[in-house]
Amino acid sequence: MSKKYQNGFFIFGLVVLTVMVTQLDFAEVWKGLKHAGYWFFAVVALWAVLYIFNTAAWYTIIRSQVPATDPKQPKTGAESPTPFSFWWLYKITISGFALNYATPGGLMGGEPYRIMELSPKIGTERASSSVILYVMTHIFSHLWFWLLATLLYILTMRVNLFMGTLLTIVGAFCLVAIWFFLRGYKKGVAMFLMNILKHIPGAKRWARGFIEKHQQQLNTIDQQITALHQQNPRSFACAVLLELACRFLSAFEIMFVLLVLMPSVNYLQCVLILAFTSLFANMLFFMPLQLGGREGGFLMSVNGLGMTASAGIFVALIVRLRELIWTGIGLLLIKFDKKK
């Protein structure tokens, strides 16, 4: 990536992060940190491990792809070499998530950054398709996580009429969305999304021109997307399972925080809190760091499990501080780039 664009991503993220930090009540933050004690450091360290799972899923996707311009590469099943290390991709993963956290609209920041960093190493089409595939896999694992959490709630909690209705809606939504994603894995999504844009006022003229100029590249991206599901089912399953495992392991973050308040908290409760909080927060994906949405999700989740509102506020505060710290780390890693 050119220095100009790298600096642009860094400065934009830094400005947004600074604005977010100024919105904090520092007295409340200090009180929360003293209350959390060493568990706060455990929460921050946990995400260094979770980002390894995210990177491993993306790395699996990239290695499963066959370069479209390389006729010597086998067309099925084999992994292709990568001109970069796992830990370089780990750095890009953290920075990409940092930009997603700081950007209104989420995917408007991190994904272009990932593509621009990866393109000089493996080509634009392969970089674009790998990023699209990773985003699809990341969301796909969330859908399975929410669906499994719905079943877990039914099996472990008392379900009244309201919760039964809500769980039915969530379950139906997840099943329909899973079907849609499976269709995308089988037939591709790049041309499908561009064809949708062709019918949206204000974007249709640009979309038609873009399709005319880049139809071959869009078809290549779709071929790379469908190849993962059709030609590399093991890589597909591995990437999904890595992301799904990351979802379940991230519930330990909530468990670490709640252990400060209630030593009797169990892991299954934390899974349910995380599932319904993330579902509510992702409905407000257009807000930077999902401000307000995540806090409201924690309050609703802990109340639904019979915990106090103060527990939800405390968890939300610690999670928010962890996100700010890793956002700052990710932005600094944008500037940490070895030059050959």
Image (spheres, rainbow, N blue to C red):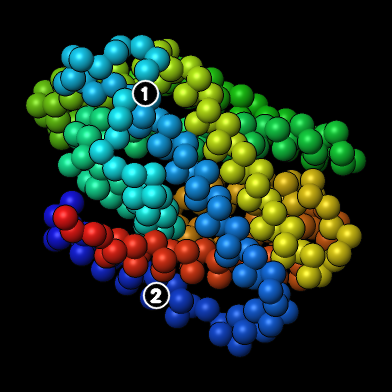
Q: Verify CB contact (< 8 Å) between mark 1 and mark 2.
A: no
Q: Nearer the viewer, residue 124 or 79?
A: 79
Crowdedness of circle 2 by 10 Å Cα count: few (<14), some, many (20+)?
few
Give the x, y percent position of residue 127: 27, 35
Amino acid type assigned to the residue bearing label 2 in the image: Val
Q: Which residue is mark 2?
A: 19
Report the residue at 55% width, 57% height from top: 47
Q: Which mark is residue 6?
A: none
Give the x, y percent position of residue 209: 11, 29
Residue 105 in sight here:
no
The image quadrant that residue 170 belongs to is: top right
Report the residue at 41% width, 58% height from top: 98
**Up/down of 50 relative to 335, above or below:** above
- Nearer the observer: mark 1 or 2; the answer is 1
Give the x, y percent position of residue 185: 42, 20
Crowdedness of circle 1 by 10 Å Cα count: few (<14), some, many (20+)?
some
Report the residue at 55% width, 50% height from top: 50
Q: CA distance from mark 1 to mark 2?
A: 43 Å
Circle 1 sits in a helix, a strand or a loop, which is it? loop
Report the residue at 34% width, 67% height from top: 332
Q: Is residue 313 left or right of residue 53?
A: right
Q: Which mark is residue 79?
A: 1
Give the x, y percent position of residue 296: 64, 60
